[in-house]
Amino acid sequence: MVDLRKEKIQIEAVNSWIKNNKIGTVEVATGHGKTFIAFRCILTMPKKSNVLFLAETQVREKTIREDVTQYKKFYGKDPLAGHNVKFGLYQSAHKYKLEDWFPNKNPIIVVMDEIHDSISEVYLNFAKNNLFGTNIARLGLSATIDRKSKYLIQGVETTKFKVLEQFCPVVYTYGLQDSLDNKTTRDLRFFIVTHQLDNSGKNIKGGSKAVPFMQSEQAAYSYLDKEFKQSMFRKYKSETEKTFAIRGAASRRARLLYSLPSKIRECRKLVSHLQDKTLVFGLDSKTLLSICSTAIVEENDNWEKDLKDFESGKTLLGASNKMLKQGANIPGLKTVVLLAYYSKPKDFVQIVGRNTRSKDLGNVIIFVTDGTQEQSWFKSMTEGMNVPFIYCSSVEHLLKQL
C-alpha cells in the first residue's frame, strides 16, 4: 500500500529538483523513499536516456533492483524500462568520463546515492571531470548533509555543503527530526547505555614487539588519550608532519574504543536477551564477527547468503558496518544497536534510518563509554536531535526498560 504522506514528500522533492533545471540534491530522512524520488526523476527523462547510478557500496545495486520491483508493484510501471542503466562505485568512478559508460549521444542523468560520500580529495574528480559547468541532469540523494565540519578537499578547507553548491546544491530538505515531529516515521525509543572502561583485568596488548605487556582498558585509554593531546602541541618540521602525527594518535585512540573487550562482552549479553530482529552497527569487522558470526562485512565470504537469511527472518541477529548503512531494507527490524560510531550526524541519521520502516515501536540502543572521547562523538553525532534519550547505567538496567 502506498504511504500517501511519504508520496507527498517525494513529489515535493521531485518538483523542487525540476524547478532547478533537474540539477540538485534532495536531503530526505531514511525510510521516506529516496530511491523512489530517483525513480520519479528518471521518469521525467526522455526514453532511451542514459542513467548512471553511483554509490559507495556494491550492495546498493541489489537494493535498487529490489526497489524497482516495489515501485512497479505500487505504480504499475518499471521506472528504468526503456533506459540504458548502469551502476558504478565512487571508488572507481573518478577515473572515468561519462563517454566511457555511454558512448552514444542520448540524454544523461546521474544519480549519486549518499552524495556526501562522493566529496573527498579523490572521489570529487568524478564531478569535476563530468558535471562541473555542465547542464547534465543530476540528482544527489542524502539523509543529511554536514554543514559544519570542515575538510581539506583538493587544497581548499571547506564544508561538503559548500562543495555541493558548486555542482549539485541542496534543493529540498525533509530531515529525521521532521519525520519524528510529523510522525511520518515509526515511533522510536532511544536508549543510552553508559559503559565503563574495565580497570580490573589486563586484556589490552601494549608495549613493543621486543617488550610486550598486557594492560587494562583504563590504562590503555589513558596512555592513548595523553599521546593524542601531546601530539597537538609538539613542534613539527611541517604542517604535513603535524597532520599525520595528530591523525595517527587520534586513530589509535579511536580503534581502542571501537573494539573494547568489555563493550563487546556487554553487547553480547544484550543481544542474547533480545528476541526480535536486531542489527548491530560497529566500525571494526573483527569485533562485529565476534558478536555475530554472520555479520554482513567484506571479511565474511558468505555475506550475501547471510544477508538473505537475515532479511528473510531465518536469522534474527545481524551486524554490519558501512555495507548496510546505506539503502538496505531489512523487513521486520525491531532494534538497532550502535556499538561504535563516528561523530558525524549523517552517520547517526543513516543508521537510525535502518529502523524507521516498520509501523510498530522500534528501539535504538547506543553505547557511550564514560570518561572517553566517545562522549564527545555521541554529543556531536546527535546534535540538534530533539528526542527523549533514556539513560541506562548498565545492560541489565536497559533490559528492564525494554
Image: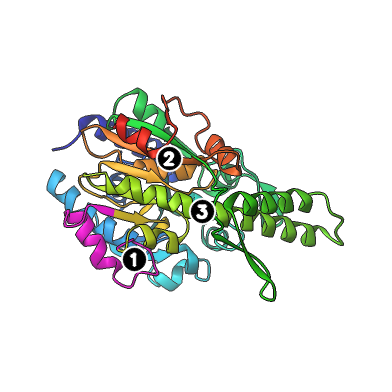
Q: Amino acid at mark 1?
A: Lys
Amino acid on which the number 3 mark rests in the picture:
Tyr
**N-terminal-most mark, 3 or 2:** 3
Determine if the magenta segment contains residue 280. Answer: no
**Residue in the foreground of this view, choosing between 7 and 300:** 300
Q: Is residue 300 magenta?
A: yes
Q: Write down the residue under mark 3.
A: 258
Residue 251 horizontal/vertical position (percent): 62, 57
Residue at horizontal 57%, vertical 62%?
125
Of 307 and 173, nearer the camera is 307
Of the numbered discs 3 and 1, the one sitting upstream in the chain is 1
Q: What is the span of residues highlighted in magenta in the rendered image?
A: 294-317
Residue 293 pos. (x, y %): 32, 63
Q: Please give the residue where the numbered disc 2 appears in the rendered image.
A: 366
Quarter of the image containing the C terminus?
top left
Q: Is residue 81 visible?
A: no
Distance from the alpha carbon under mark 3 to that under mark 2: 13 Å
Do the residues bearing badges 2 and 1 touch, measured as CB atoms within 8 Å? no
Question: Do the numbered discs 3 and 1 sit on residues whose CB atoms are within 8 Å?
Answer: no
Q: Quadrant of the N terminus?
A: top left
Categorize mark 3 by other alpha carbons within 10 Å: few (<14), some (14-19), many (20+). many
Question: Looking at the image, can residue 377 be seen?
Answer: yes
For numbered disc 3, what is the local secondary structure? helix
Point 50% across, 49% down: residue: 116
Along the horizontal axis of the image, is 327 left or right of 367?
left
Residue 377, given in percent of the width and then of the height, sits at 56, 41
In this rendering, which labeled residue sits more in front, label 3 or label 1?
Answer: 3
